[in-house]
Image: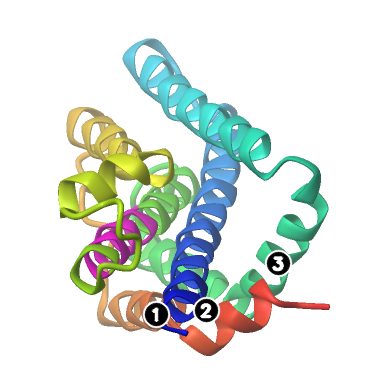
Amino acid sequence: MKTEYNENLMTAITYNILFANDIACGAVVQFVSDIRKSPSYRHDVKRRVNGIETFRRRYEQSIKHIVGDKMEYYMEACDEFTTGLEHDIRIFYITIKQALDNQRYDDSETIARMQWSRAMVQAAAQVWIDRTEEVADLNLFPPLRTLRQVRERLSYLNLNPLRKQYAQLIENHFAQSDFITCPEGQKAFDIICRKLYDAKSVLAAAIHD
């Protein structure tokens, strides 16, 4: 009975990470599309943005390979989970854009999209950190006894390298380095982070009809 419970919990945790990553990757797609139309997209910025896009593509390709013939079910599950956050994600972007406009930043739309997508990647990376700690602490996957072993096993879900790529891009080329630009932005981001961990929403999406 305990083994079945652990397996179910491990499945739910894996889905939680997958759902957060899917949202982050969707945000990356929008950012890359926007910045490629911007005057900023040249030289080292172009190189770094292309590195971000390459990471996303490789991640999604690995997920497609692992999911295999269950891809349609997986995509439907991701869509169902994302639906519950769409409003908050949109509000978060708007608050960033408005704050940048108030500060009269040039190309505020591109910078807002960059900071917004960076935040989604950061949130997903934190989900991976927290959930892998949970797997190790509860010994949900007995062959893996330590946190290091758990993280090595689930490294294919780790977006922390992508988070670092965003940080390097922004620190080297954009003065506005903090994606939380106002109290409203912080509030919106906190709501998103809380919903990313909501067990009921994760389970409802994972076992959807």
Instruction: Residue 108: give its label.
Output: none
The residue labelled by disc 2 is 88
Q: Which residues are magenta?
A: 122-134
Please determine whether, in this image, residue 49 is positioned above or below residue 16: above
Please report the residue visible at 63 percent of the width from the left and 73 percent of the height from the top. Answer: 81
Report whether 1 appears left or right of 160: right
Crowd band around label 3 with a 10 angstrom C-alpha radius: few (<14), some (14–19), many (20+): many
Crowd band around label 2 with a 10 angstrom C-alpha radius: few (<14), some (14–19), many (20+): some
**Mark closest to the chain's N terminus, 3 or 1:** 3
The residue labelled by disc 1 is 188
Q: Residue 153 occupies which quadrant of the picture?
A: top left
Q: Are marks 3 and 1 in contact (CB under 8 Å)?
A: no
User: What distance separates the C-alpha of mark 1 from that of mark 2?
Assistant: 6 Å
Instruction: Residue 77: give its label.
Output: 3
User: What distance separates the C-alpha of mark 2 from that of mark 3?
Assistant: 19 Å
> Helix, strand, or loop for circle 3?
helix
Please report the residue visible at 26 percent of the width from the left and 70 percent of the height from the top. Answer: 134
Please report the residue visible at 79 percent of the width from the left and 59 percent of the height from the top. Answer: 73
